[in-house]
Image: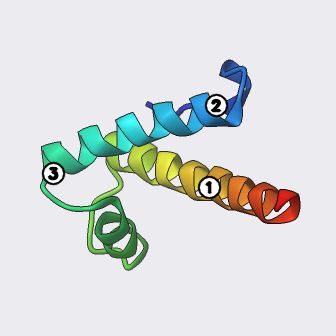
Amino acid sequence: MALRRSLYPSVIEALDALLRSLISYEQKHQMSSDEFYERYLAGELEDSREFVEWAGDYQHYMELKKEMEKKLKVSS
């Protein structure tokens, strides 16, 4: 799916789209994105297009999540 933040008017909408994508991958492959990412980085999984996109979506999700947490911490 490889979502780009610039396609969404807000970080919340980008996070929502990424979460939907991650949930779809998790249901299809019967593993959490955390588990998938650890196994992918360890070289236990193939470099198929789908797995590369899943890894990219997961990385993007984690970056946006950290950004949101940082903003919430500063504003409180």
Report the mark closest to the observer, 1 or 2: 1
Q: Is residue 32 above or below residue 14?
A: below
Q: Which mark is residue 29?
A: 3
Mark 1 vs 2: CB contact within 8 A: no
From the image, tell me which residue sits under label 1. Answer: 65
Residue 24 image position (x, y, % from top left): 26, 38
Q: What is the three-letter code of the residue carrying label 2?
A: Arg
Residue at the image position 55 percent from the left and 50 percent from the top = 61
Q: Please, what secondary structure does the residue beneath circle 1 have? A: helix
Quadrant in the picture for residue 41: bottom left
Which mark, residue 34? Answer: none
Q: Is 71 left, or right, of 57 in this rendering?
A: right
Residue 76: x %, y % from top left: 82, 62
Q: How far across and down, in percent of the image, does residue 59 sit?
A: 56, 56
* Front label number (1 vs 3): 1
Tell me the SS state at disc 3.
Answer: helix
